[in-house]
Structures are given as C-alpha cells and as structure tokens.
Image (cartoon, grey):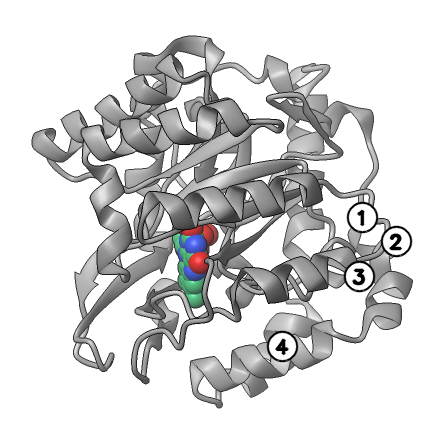
Amino acid sequence: MGIYTSLVRPVLFTLPPERAQRLAEVALRQGPFWRALRPAFQLNDERLHADIGGIHLPNPIGLAAGYDKDCRLVDSLSCLGFGYIVAGTVVLHPREGNPRPRLARNPREGSLVNSLGFPSHGLETACRSLKQRGNSRVPLVLSISGLDLEEFRQCYQALQPLAAGIELNISSPNTEGIRMFQEPQRLEELLAALSPLKERPLFLKLPPYFDEAQRGRVMEMVDLCLHYSVEGVTAVNTWPVEDTRLATGHGGLSGRPLFPHMLRIVQDVRRHAGEGLVINACGGIASGEGALNALRAGANTVQLLTGLIYQGPGLMRGINRYLLRYMEREGIPSLKEISREPLEGLEQP
Ligand SMILES: Cc1cc2nc3c(=O)[nH]c(=O)nc-3n(C[C@H](O)[C@H](O)[C@H](O)COP(=O)(O)O)c2cc1C
C-alpha cells in the first residue's frame, strides 16, 4: 500500500468530498514541490508514446476533464506522470453550479456521484491562468461547453491557441442546457459552426448508453464526427443516476461501476468507426490491467479522474509500468501493436 492510500486518503476521506477536493487543490498549487517530485512519478519510455490526431503523447494516460475546471493546476498536474491533461470544462460565463451537497463517495465500490453542474470562474479566468502557465512538456487538451452555439464558439476561439487540442463536452448529465447538443441536428449545427474555425485536433466527449435506442443516438454522433473530420471521441462521461445524498437528487456516477460499460462502448465505437477515429477510453480505469483492457478493447489512450482520487498520484506510473511489463512479456514493440481482443475476459480486478 502506498503513502497516499495508507495515510493521505484516510485523512482526506474524513472530510466532505468537496472540502477534501479544495485541500487537494491547495496542495497542488505548490508548484515547486510537484516539480521536485516529477522524476518520481514519470516514466520515460519510447514504447509508451502515443499519438492522438497529431498530438504526440509521452504515454497514453490522460487526466479526464473536471478535476481542474479553471485550469489553475495544469503545471502541477503535468508532473504526476500523465501523458496529457484535459483541463476544464471551461464555460463562457462564471457559474455557481448546482446547490450543495453535490459530490458523494461510495468507497466500497470505488465510485463518486457528482451533480456539480459546471461551477466555473468562466472563460476569462481560464485564459488568464493558462497564459501564466509554465512550459510543461505534457500536452494540454481543453474541455469546453456552452448553453448555445455562441458560447461554444467563443470558448473555442479563445482557447484553441492555448491548447494542443479541444474536447467538446456535450454529455455532462448535470447541466440541462448542454444535453440538447446530443440531438443529431443540434450537434451537426455545432460541428458545422466550429469546423471553419478549427486549428487544432478536436475530440467529442460521448455519453454512456445502456440500451439500443441510446446506442443508436451515440453512433449517430460518431458518424457526425467522421463526417466533420473530428479527430476523436472520449468515451464516456458519467452515468446519470438518482442519489438522495445530493441536493438535486441525481447526479453522474463515475469510477469502477462504469468500467464494464465503458469497455463495451469503446469496442462498439471502434467496430462502428473503424481505425480512422481516435478513441480515448474513460470510465472507471484505476489499474494497469484496466488501462490495458481498454486499449485491447480498441482505445488509443485512456483517461481517468475517479481513479486518481482513490489511488493517488502514484497511479499513472503504476499503470505505465504495468503496460511496459505486459509489452515486454508479449514481445510487443509499441502501444500501437497491442492487439484488439474480444470483450470476454477483459476486466479489471
Ligand atoms: C467530480 C467530477 C467532475 C467532473 N467534471 C467534468 C467536467 O467538467 N467535464 C467533463 O467532460 N467531465 C467531467 N467529469 C467526468 C469525467 O471526466 C469522466 O468522464 C468520468 O468521471 C468517468 O471517468 P472516471 O471513472 O475515471 O472518473 C467529472 C467527473 C467527476 C467525478
């Protein structure tokens, strides 16, 4: 057991989840401390290199959107062994988010339920933080969202020059307005509006699906991505659930229970889209085996958030070491050559 899981997590978990998160943020603002620790978290090996739509990654593990909503912690987060960081989701205007409580833990199943609803200091603050950031070697993808086309457009134009790529969030279950962009016609309008402005690789964050009707709608979104030359998708956002601990009574479930659904969706999207689309697998990844199985299901990279909160900053190095050991054992020279596998047997202990 590491220092985080034996000492730090037990203390953090005595606090209400949002307060624990704020404490973690205070710690992450100590830039020089994390820069000094960088060598302990990082694993440099060419075999781990990945490419997402022309963005070169030192390894395939990304931090998922939502941990650093105002882009204030990018420098420190870049020292933790990630291959890329997704910061945001940034929205145009400052927002309070939903009423509290809006974050709950389920420690036994390694999950969280959140109904944050995009608390944000808005685009201007994010731009200011990003302009002050250091010269990190870890690529940055910025997640943006909006309640209408114009909000998306303004965030897109302002943030593209400050990032290696942009991820469109149309799938957060906690913000009524943005879900309308899951309607194929509205999504088409959005992609058509952003297309002429595009200067960097673009990714679309997909919602999870649990039945045929929802699956059909997500595959329509994938088709639109292919049509508008969107480089990739991130599969998936949180799972809408009821939860009476939250003031809103419902939220998005993240963490381990999402994992088998995410694997099925990644495999489905890969079959549907072929090899031309980047897939970033996201949902419940919390171990080397989980990450490997997401890659074998068809993903190019993995993203994680809840795993970081439960396992701490040693997780990324642990996953990268696991991937390297697997590649050595199987005689696989690079990540790209990890073969696709049928879903049976792809699990996470
Ligand atoms: C506290 C919290 C906040 C989140 N905020 C965002 C967000 O702002 N934008 C977004 O696209 N996804 C957001 N997500 C979803 C994550 O990016 C990710 O899709 C989801 O949690 C599944 O991955 P995980 O199981 O590794 O956490 C959030 C998740 C959590 C737990």
Quadrant position of the N terminus in the picture = bottom right
Question: Callout 4, which amino acid?
Answer: Ala
Query: Please, is residue 108 above or below residue 306 in the view?
Result: below
Between 60 and 321, the residue placed more toward the observer is 60
Please name the amino acid that badge 3 sits on: Gln
Q: Sequence-wise, which precedes: disc 1 or disc 4?
A: 4
Q: Earlier in the sequence, mark 1 or mark 3?
A: 1
Image spot of residue 310 (x, y percent): 51, 66
Disc 2 + disc 3, Cβ < 8 Å = no
Which residue carries the number 2 mark? 39
Q: Residue at x 41, y 72 (%)?
A: 95
10 Å neighbourhood of mark 1: few (<14), some, or many (≥20)? many
- What residue would you read off at disc 1? 42
Task: Indicate which disc, 4 or 3, sits on the residue closer to the N terminus.
Answer: 4
User: Disc 2 or 3, which lies upstream in sequence?
Assistant: 2
Task: Give the Cα separation between the discs numbered 4 and 3.
Answer: 21 Å
Q: CA distance from mark 1 to mark 3?
A: 23 Å
Q: Are marks 1 and 2 in contact (CB under 8 Å)?
A: yes
**Quarter of the rendering containing residue 220:** top left
Mark 1 near mark 3, Cβ–Cβ under 8 Å? no
**Labels 4, 3: front one:** 3
Above or below 152: residue 221: above
At label 1, the amino acid type is: Gln
Q: Quadrant of residue 243?
A: bottom left
